Amino acid sequence: MQPDPARMAETREWFAKAALDLRAAEFEFTAVPPLTADIAFHAQQLAEKVLKGFLTWHDQPFRKTHNLVEIGQQCVAIDATLEDLARRAARLTEYAWKFRYPGEPDEPSVAEAQEALARVRKRDVSFGPRTREGAKAWDTS
């Protein structure tokens, strides 16, 4: 059965945006000093967009939210093998807002930023939809 072209295109868009967040986070490590708050933010955004791309592929609606616990639970309901990824990604939820505004806590350390990004590197989220067509949707190169 051929996937719906519009759904495949929308899924690919989610994954392409996620790939941009990964590139941004990696680039921000090259700044002196590294832009750790932005790295943490982009790690959260990367996880959010990949999980939303997975839900899009499976034609599952989702709320407009940055809550990775909620989004991850929806993904696990479709594919239980994503439980570990969803659990790791959930810890990034607070980076959608933490450190973003004046008066917030100190910026994360370089080690904390590295750990945030390590939770969602492409090798960890490259599950894509688990079909040949899904792999094509994930391939944003």
Image (tube, grey):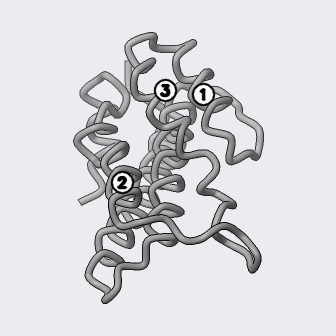
Badge 3 density bin: few <14, some 14–19, many ≥20, Cα 10 Å: some
Residue at 61% x, 45% y is 93
* Residue 20 falls left or right of residue 54: left
Q: Image height check: is 22 above or below 67?
A: below
- The mark that comes first in sequence, 2 or 3, is 3
Q: Image height check: is 89 above or below 141?
A: above
Query: Where is residue 52 shown, x and y percent of the image?
Result: 56, 40
Query: Where is residue 84 shown, x and y percent of the image?
Result: 40, 21
Badge number at residue 45: none
Query: Which residue is the site of mark 2?
Result: 117
- The mark that comes first in sequence, 1 or 2, is 1
CA distance separating discs 1 and 2? 27 Å
Query: Where is residue 44 shown, x and y percent of the image?
Result: 52, 52
The residue positioned farthest toward the bottom in the image shown: 32
Residue type pointed to by label 1: Asp
Residue type pointed to by label 2: Leu
Query: Which residue is the site of mark 1?
Result: 59
Q: Image height check: is 127 above or below 118?
A: above
Residue at disc 2, secondary structure: helix
CA distance separating discs 3 and 1? 22 Å
Badge 1 density bin: few <14, some 14–19, many ≥20, Cα 10 Å: few
